[in-house]
Amino acid sequence: MRIRHGADAVWEGQAQSLTDTSAPNADVQAISARLAHALFTGFPGESGRTIEVK
């Protein structure tokens, strides 16, 4: 996700999930909610920081 002000990016963030799609907990809505929560917790956060959420 990139938030822009004019032509300049003022914030960028990325989230990804490694999920076995055949697993019983591979619920797209639940995974999307977890990714969004992880991405925006502590928004805007520290520049260049990478976090891992399990």
Image: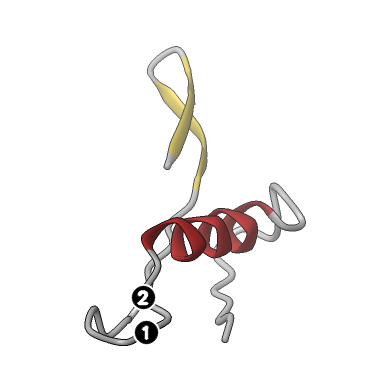
- Label 2 residue SS: loop
Q: Which residue is mark 1?
A: 24
Looking at the rendering, in which quadrant would you find the N terminus?
top left
Please identify the residue farthest to the top as the structure is shown: 6
Amino acid bearing label 2: Ala
Q: Which residue is mark 2?
A: 26
Q: Is residue 11 above or below residue 8?
A: below
Per the model, the C-alpha gap separating discs 1 and 2 is 6 Å
Q: Position of residue 8 (x, y in %)?
A: 44, 24
The one nearer the camera, 54 or 7, is 54
Residue 47, by quadrant, is bottom right
For residue 22, side relative to residue 50 (left or right): left
Q: Is residue 45 above or below residue 23?
A: above
Q: Are marks 1 and 2 in contact (CB under 8 Å)?
A: yes
Looking at the rendering, in which quadrant would you find the C terminus?
bottom right
Amino acid bearing label 1: Pro
The one nearer the camera, 37 or 20, is 20
Q: What residue is drawn where x is 46% and y is 65%?
A: 31
Q: What residue is drawn where x is 33% and y is 81%?
A: 18
Q: Position of residue 42 (x, y in %)?
A: 77, 56
Residue 6, by quadrant, is top left
Q: Position of residue 22 (x, y in %)?
A: 22, 84
The one nearer the camera, 38 or 7, is 38
